[in-house]
Image: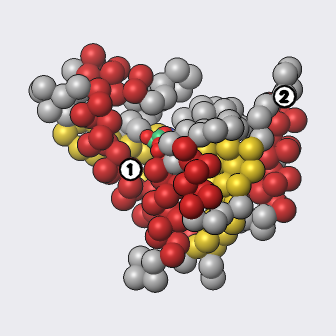
Amino acid sequence: MTHSLAVLVSGTGRHLENLADLALDEQADFDAEVSVVLSNRTGVAALDRAARFGLRAEVLEGAEGESVESYGRRVFDVVRDAGADTVVLAGFLKKLWIPADFAGRVINIHPSLLPAFGGKGYFGMNVHRAVLERGCQVSGCTVHLVDEVYDNGPILLQRWCAVEPEDSAEDLAARVFQEELLALPEALRRFWRR
Ligand code: GRF
């Protein structure tokens, strides 16, 4: 069965590109298509990447004073309209309410070994800076199911890497990201096999 992905983004879109590449690669053992890309911001690189792949892309900005639930309802209207069966948060930085019919079908990737360095404020380079400040000797990434609490749901897959003594936050981010590129598709393969 070919799975249908909705990929939610806020920024760069490297994961989006990786998933779209894999979906086109018949040797990749990745039986999926990206049926919609949804961004909460206009003008981000992820939307350019979506356009290069010819993917359907929608921008849904939160309205002034809009509740998390109201925003989530609009997001999932698009997700359902696109026929997606799985939702991936690939660098999506807005709090997302999940309706009952998608509970257990929304997946996030986070650039630390959760539950360490997760939760509010831990996004992007903040995560890697905190890992370095604490003196961690390993870091990595976590793919998990999303529930109503930030970075909290059941873990599907983790991959780790070393933290080197001279690492800058950017060095560490780049090393972790190499693990992320493997972790997200592999977690999806396993999730779909369950
Ligand atoms: C990744 O590091 C991911 O772990 C985090 O946001 C970043 C997304 O990068 N949640 P990109 O937008 O896919 O380039």
Q: Hey, what amino acid is under mark 2? A: Ala
Q: Position of residue 168 (x, y in %)?
A: 23, 25
Q: Is mark 2 within 8 Å of ligand 1?
A: no
Q: Is mark 1 within 8 Å of ligand 1?
A: yes
Q: Quadrant of residue 72?
A: top right
Residue 18 left/right relative to 4: left
Q: Residue placed at 67% from the left, 69% from the top?
A: 4
Q: Earlier in the sequence, mark 2 or mark 1?
A: 2
Tell me the element at label 2: loop
Q: Hey, what amino acid is under mark 1? A: Glu
Q: Mark 2 sits on what residue?
A: 63
Q: Mark 1 sits on what residue?
A: 180
Q: CB atoms at circles 2 and 1 under 8 Å apart?
A: no
Q: Residue placed at 40% from the left, 82% from the top?
A: 27
**Is residue 194 in view from this perspective?**
no
Tell me how the rendering is colored.
secondary structure
Q: Give the tally of numbered discs.
A: 2
Give neighbour class at mark 2: few <14, some 14-19, many 20+ (Cα, 10 Å): few
Q: Position of residue 105 (x, y in %)?
A: 67, 57
Q: Residue placed at 85% from the left, 44% from the top?
A: 74
Give neighbour class at mark 1: few <14, some 14-19, many 20+ (Cα, 10 Å): many
Q: Quadrant of the C terminus?
A: bottom right
Q: Quadrant of the N terminus?
A: bottom right
- Rendered position, 3 above or below 17: below
Mark 2 or mark 1, which is nearer to you?
A: 2
